[in-house]
Image (tube, coloured by chain):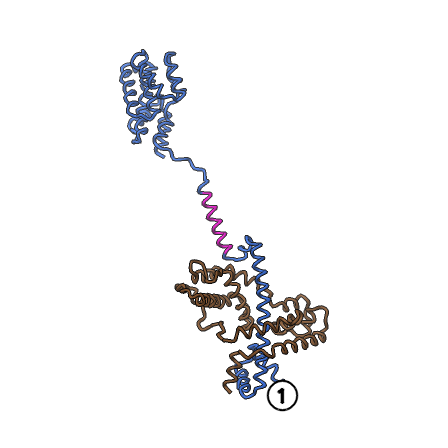
Amino acid sequence: MEIYRHHSKVEAYVFGKLSQADAQALEQEAQEDEALRELIHLYQLEYRGMELLLQAQLRKKINRWNANRKKSWPLSFLRNRYMTYYLSAAAMIGLLFCLWVLWPTTPQQTQAEIALAYTPTYEYQVRGLDQPDSLQLGLQLLQDAAYQEAIAFFKDCTEQSPQAERCALLLGHAYFQQGNAQPSEEALHRAREIFEPLATQSSQKAIREYASWYLCLLPLIEGKDIPWDRLREIAGDPNHLFYQKSQQLRKALSN
Amino acid sequence: MKRSKANAMETADPFTGLEEIYLSLLDDPRVRNSLQRRSIQGKFPGGLTADDIISESFERLVLYAWKSGQQDPEELLPYFIRICQNMINKLFNREGTKEQPLQESTLDKWVVEGEDFEEEWLGQEERDRLLWEAVDQLDERCQNFLLMRFKENLSSKEIAIWTEELTYKQVDRIMDKCRAKYRRLIKNVPQFFPLTQYLKTAK
């Protein structure tokens, strides 16, 4: 019966709760005492059996946790604080990217687009010029953006019509709209040359100003730099038909 | 001082709070990185996934925590990583696959050298099988009572509060019967413990 006084000590020893000195003393004693060894063994078996039981129950629990985790998959990520940080950072980056992409910005215009934007419109020509009836067909073609036909019309017109200067101007306009800088320049120079001596008359003055304005814009069509001296000349004349446009163009180009 | 029912329930359940620890370890990037570094293109031998290794390692971690009395997940993390690494090494050795060389990392400082939880005892598996057969023969109430007694060190009064049906004297009687039965069942399990072998041979 003496062995039973060891029970609590052996239990503490197997559970690892005995101090080192006491454990050594018990081991020393067990080396001499077979009954004590068997008792230690019995407790170890009990302990190990409980470990196995705990392990089995834990495995069941883990399987259940895994199943629950799969069910609540999207939210389970948020349980981890690191994942929360990563998701927050990703959301911020995504938001900034969306703002960058969707932020309303004015598209950068090319020089040719600027030139076309500042080209006199058909209505503008009507306001500045008194167009005769014989040119109505050509003007209609310009309005319909049928530039090839308009060019053919105004070519004939430049050679035959008494309104050759206007035809030359409109021919230059048609070439200009097509993006053909060279023929446009030739036609516009011709329009200027014809009417230079007669510039005192108002309509002829208007044609001359039209032509100079076109010639000012022509290099932009070719992708070259604008002739600043010509633009300054127009912008410095308040009586010029394109005075305001030239001011606006100067601002647009300086931006 | 009388223990409340809720308190007794919480104390009696050996798995209280483990789910949170398990889930945090499962999603911990340090654990994931550690496993990733040991894998071959994200794969492990035997078709196992990182989740499988974490699950099995967690079982061992709980047993270790039970023995050592450690509860803090941050303190247990280095041990957990070590257990995972041991398990991976074992898998690679069994498969005969060349192990992925370990790269230098700050994680290495957490690995406690010399701590090895692998029991290299030849009869261990056989002993565990016999023990499990014995434990499995006990009824569920006996299993729970014994677990409470061994794991949580609860007194008969505390177990009686937890059951809500029995008096502590009845619990005492049941516990005695369960333990006697348990001891009878495990009596013939051979001695495969290193300590008892040592004590025997040292004589």
Is residue B158 rendered to the left or right of residue B40? right
Q: Is residue B110 visible?
A: no
Q: Colour of chain B?
A: brown
The one of A185 and A225 positioned closer to us in this rendering: A185
* Residue labelled with disc 1: A2
On the image, the x and y values in percent for residue A200 come to 31, 14
The one of A103 and B202 positioned closer to us in this rendering: B202
Chain ID for blue:
A
Q: Is residue A145 visible?
A: yes
On the image, the x and y values in percent for residue A224 come to 29, 31
Residue at 64% in and 70% down: B144
Picture quarter with the N terminus of chain B: bottom right
Is residue A58 rendered to the left or right of residue B111? right
On the image, the x and y values in percent for residue A153 come to 34, 16
* Magenta-drawn segment: A83-99
Residue at 72% in and 73% down: B167
Q: Is residue A248 above or below residue B198?
A: above
Magenta stretch: residue B187 in it? no
On the image, the x and y values in percent for residue B129 come to 56, 72
Magenta stretch: residue A89 in it? yes
- Classify mark 1: residues with Cα within 10 Å, few (<14), some (14-19) or many (20+): few
The one of B25 and B120 positioned closer to us in this rendering: B120
Q: Quadrant of residue A128?
A: top left
Q: Is residue B26 above or below residue B169?
A: above
- Residue kind at label 1, given as amino acid type: Glu
Q: Quadrant of residue A249?
A: top left
The one of A113 and B10 positioned closer to us in this rendering: B10
